[in-house]
């Protein structure tokens, strides 16, 4: 069994969290059947890649030479705020 490292957890979080947030927000707006996240992992990764493709690159470029606080703010926008806003 592979060792669990912080780098692997960060990568997993970056690829699943935005998509999972999108799926959960959409399920609040449009009522759906109850589901488990394990059943929607592939869909969550696809939503995350779409999110990174659309908004990730501009945020990374804009914060490349910025203060660390601005970089963290940009990552919060990419990982949390943008997936919520996409649903509206």
Image: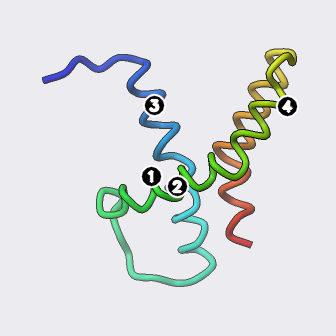
Q: Nearer the viewer, residue 14 or 29?
A: 14
Q: How is the image coloured?
A: rainbow
| Left or right: 1, with 55 as reference point | left
Q: Which residue is mark 3?
A: 11
- Pointer 3 or 4: first along the chain: 3
- Pointer 3 or 1: first along the chain: 3
What numbered label is drawn on residue 86? none
Q: Which residue is mark 4?
A: 62
Q: Nearer the viewer, mark 3 or mark 4?
A: 4
The local crowd at label 2, few if under 14, some if 14 to 19, many if 20 or more residues have their Cα within 10 Å, is: many
- Give SS at disc 3: helix
- Pointer 1 or 2: first along the chain: 2
Identify which residue is drawn at 65% across, 56% down.
83
As drawn, 14 above or below 72? below
Label 3 – label 4 distance at C-alpha: 22 Å
- Does the residue at mark 2 contact the one at mark 4 (Cβ under 8 Å)? no
- Give SS at disc 1: helix
- Pointer 3 or 2: first along the chain: 3
The local crowd at label 1, few if under 14, some if 14 to 19, many if 20 or more residues have their Cα within 10 Å, is: some
Q: Quadrant of residue 68?
A: top right
Q: Nearer the viewer, mark 2 or mark 4?
A: 4
Q: Which residue is mark 2?
A: 19
Where in the figure is residue 80, as x and y percent of width and height? 66, 47
Q: Which residue is mark 1?
A: 45
- Give SS at disc 4: helix
Label 2 – label 4 distance at C-alpha: 23 Å
Identify which residue is drawn at 74% across, 72% down.
88
- Give SS at disc 2: helix
As drawn, 55 above or below 68? below
- Does the residue at mark 1 contact the one at mark 2 (Cβ under 8 Å)? yes
Where in the figure is residue 24, as x and y percent of width and height? 53, 64
As drawn, 18 above or below 33? above
């Amino acid at each position: 069994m592979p060792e669990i490292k912080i780098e692997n957890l960060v990568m997993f979080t970056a690829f699943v969290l935005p998509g999972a947030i999108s799926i959960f927000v959409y399920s609040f707006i449009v009522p759906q059947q109850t589901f488990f996240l394990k059943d929607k992992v592939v869909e969550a990764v696809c939503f995350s890649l779409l999110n990174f493709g659309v908004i990730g690159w501009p945020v990374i470029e804009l914060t490349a030479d910025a203060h660390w606080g601005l970089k963290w703010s940009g990552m919060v926008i990419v990982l949390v705020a943008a997936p919520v806003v996409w649903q509206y």
